[in-house]
Image (cartoon, grey):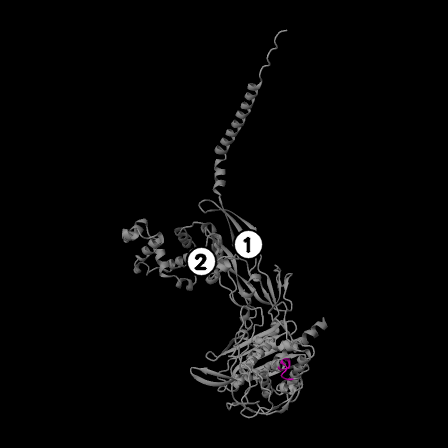
Amino acid sequence: MGKKRKKRAQLPFRLNIIFFIVFLLFSVLILQLGVVQILNGEDFQEEIDRTIQDTTSVPVPRGKIYDSNLDLVVDNEPVYSITYTPPKGVTAEKRLEVAEQLAQYITMSEDSVEDITERNRKEYFYLKQSDEEVDELESQIPAEEAADMDNGEFYNVVLDQIPEEAISNLSDEQKQVIAIKKELDQAYSLTPHVVKNEGVTMEEYARVAENLDKLPGVNATTDWNRAYPYEDSTFNQLLGSITSRDQGIPAELEEYYLTRGYSRNDRVGTSGLEEQYENALRGRKEQIQYTTDQNGNIMNTETVVEGQRGKDLVLTIDMEFQQQVDQIVQEELAAAIADDPYGNRHLQDAMAVVMDPQTGELLAVSGQTYDREDDEFDSGALKTLYDAHRPGSVIKGATVLAGYQSGVIRPGQSFYDEPLMLANGQVKASLVNHGWVNDYEALQVSSNVYMYYIAMRMGGETRHPLPERATISFDSSAWQEMRNYFQQFGLGVSTGIDFPFESTGFEGESGVTPGLLMDFAIGQYDTYTTMQLAQYMATIANDGYRVRPHLVKEIRQPVATEGQVGPLYESMNTEVLNRIQMDQDNIERVQEGFRRVFQTPDGTAYSYFEDKDYNPAGKTGTAENDLFIDGEHYETVNLTLAGYAPFDEPEVAFAVLVPNMGDESGRYPINHRIGERIMDAYFDIKEDRDEEAAEE
C-alpha cells in the first residue's frame, strides 16, 4: 500500500487575500484624504478655525408694578440705544477706529464730554502717533528703568511723558471721539455695553442702523427706562430706584451679583421695592451663543435661551386713596405751619400709615417734608419707616394690657388721678386732675397718673395713694418686663415689612430711676416709627393678632399684551407674627376704652369723630420733645393719633405722627385733622365703589 500524498497548505493564499483587502482599504482612505485636502480643504479648515463658542446674556426689561386696582405705578419706557459688543482680543487701536467712525453718526452729551479725563486725552494722543513718534516717546525712558517695569507700568510712564500742551487744544470733534472711546473701553468681551441711550434721536438711531457694516460690534437697538405715571405721589419714594446702565451693579456688591448670573453693566434695584423684589423684577435674560474664529471674529450667532422680562408686582396700595392721603397730609401740614409760623418754626414733617388690620395689607403710606429754604414740600414717605419719635399717650393701650397681664391691676380697678410728688421733688401729673378713674376712663381721658401707678406697681411699689415725696421701691427688672409686653405689639422691634430696611426705634437706658419707667408708660421715653404705631393699633383692633404689614400683594407672570396682568405666580398671604399673651377679655376692655376716646363726650378725640357713622375707635397722643439745634434748646411736642374702624368688624387701621410742633397752647390739631380726613376719605371711596359695583 503506497504512502498518502500530503495535503497542500492553504494559509499563504488566505494571507494574500487579507493583504489585498487591506491594500484596497488603505487606497480608499488615501484617496478620501486627498479629496478632503484638495477639494474641501478650505471649507474644513474654516470649520477647524471655529474653535471658540461663548454665550452672552442680553438684559431684558424689568417687571412692571401695579397698584391694588391694577393701575400701572411703574412702567418701562422704551428708548433708542446705541450699544457696543466687543469681540475677544480687540485692540485699543481697533476701538479708536470704531469710535472715529461712530462719531460721524452720533453726538455725545455735554456731560459725557466734560467727563473725559486727562488720561483719556493722553491715550487718544498716544494712539494717534506714528510708530516713529511712539518710539521717540518711549526712548525718553531710561533703558535701566524700563527693564524693571512690566508692560502696564511702562505704558503709564509713557503716557506721563506726553506734555500738557499736546492735549490742551483738542477740537470738539476729537473730544467727541474720546468720549465715545471712553464708553467703548468700558465694554466687556461679548457683553453689550450702552454707548448712548439718553437723548438718542431718531436720526442718530437711523444713521447708525444704516451703517452697521462699517461699525464692528456696534448695534442700534432699543433700551428702556423706568416710567412713573403717578409722578407726584410720595409713595414713589418707597418704590425705590435702580442703577443706570453706565453704572451697572454696585462695586461693593459685584461678587454677590456676578455669582448669580448678572453682568457688570446690568441694572439692579438699589433701594425700596426695586431692591426688595429684585429676584422677581429682574427677568430672564436672553442668552446668545457666539461662535468666533481664532482671531476673535464672530462667525455665527444663535439664541439659545429666549429672554423674558421680569415678573410684575401687584401692590396692596390703592393709588386713588394714596393720592388723597398725600393731599390731606400736605394740606394739613401747610395749615399747621401757617397757623403759627413762630411757634411751629421746627415743624417740617407729617407722616401717616393706613393698613388692613386683618391682613396686614398697607393701603396708603404717606409722608410730607416741608423745605423752609425752598418753600416747597418733598416726599417723606420713607420717614414712616426710618424716623422714630416719642409717641405719647397713643401707646397707653399697651400699658394697660401690660398691667392686666402682669397682675398689677385688675379689670375695672380705679386710681385717684392727682399730681404725684417724688422724693427728688419731681412732679408727675396728668394734663388735668381727673380724680377717680378706672381703666376705661383712664384711656378715655388719657390719664397719665393711672399709667404711672401701673409702672410703679410693676417695679414693686404698691402704695396708693403715693405719699408725698415718697421714696419709691423699684425693681429694675420691670424695664425689661414692660418692654417685653410692648414688643408683642411691634413696639421696639421690627414690624416685618417687606422692605430692605426699617428702624426699630431708640431704646432708652434701662434700669435707671422709676420716674423714667413712669415716662415710658405714657410714651415719653422710647421712640417708635409711624409704621410701628400702625401695627400696634392694628394688633389691638385684630383681637391681639399681630400681622406682618406688606406692600406687595401678588407677583404675576409677565404678558406681552398691554393693559393686562399675567397668571398668578405667588400670592403674599396673611402672616401672623404672634398673638399677644393677653386674655381676650382684657383686650376687649382696651378696645372699649379706645371706642370711648372717639365716641364719648369726655374722649380726647370726640370732637372730631363724634358724628361718624363708620364707628371708629383709637387713641390720641402728645409727647414732650426737647430739640437741641446748634447748641440752642427748644421745647416742642410730638402729636400722634392712631385708630381703626369699624369698631365691631375692623377693616382699616391708621397711625399719624407729627413731630416737633411748637409747644404753645391752642396749637393746630394737625394729628386729629389728618386722622379724621383720612378715615372719611377711605369710607367715601368705599361707598362710591360699592355703588358702582351695585349699578353694574
The front one of 209 and 469 is 469
Tag shown at residue 106? 2
Q: Nearer the viewer, residue 214 or 529?
A: 529
Q: Secondary structure at mark 1?
A: strand
Disc count in the image? 2
Q: Disc 1 designates what residue? A: 286
Q: Which residues are magenta?
A: 403-409
**Magenta segment includes 634:** no
At label 2, the amino acid type is: Ile
Report x, y in % for residue 625.
51, 83
To which quarter of the image does residue 615 belong? bottom right
Q: Quadrant of the C terminus?
A: bottom right
Residue drawn at the location 42% of the way across and 83% of the way down: 631
Label 2 residue SS: loop
Residue 644 on image: x %, y %: 64, 79
Q: Is residue 560 above or below residue 668?
A: above
Q: Is residue 404 magenta?
A: yes
State the residue lying farthest toward the top: 1
Mark 1, Cα crowd under 10 Å, few <14 / some 14-19 / many 20+, is some
Q: Give the amino acid type for the residue marked by disc 1 in the picture.
A: Glu
* Structural distance between the alpha carbons of marks 2 and 1: 27 Å
Asked if residue 183 shows in the view, the reply is: yes
Query: Which numbered disc flags the more N-terminal residue, 2 or 1?
Result: 2
The residue drawn where x is 57% and y is 90% is 431
What mark, if any, has residue 488 been given in the picture?
none
Q: Nearer the viewer, mark 2 or mark 1?
A: 1
Answer whether residue 326 is visible to the viewer in this image: no
**Percent x, y for residue 561?**
62, 60
- For the residues bearing labels 2 and 1, Cβ distance under 8 angstroms: no
Near-viewer residue (455 or 688)? 455
Judge by depth and name the residue closer to the eye, 487 or 546.
487
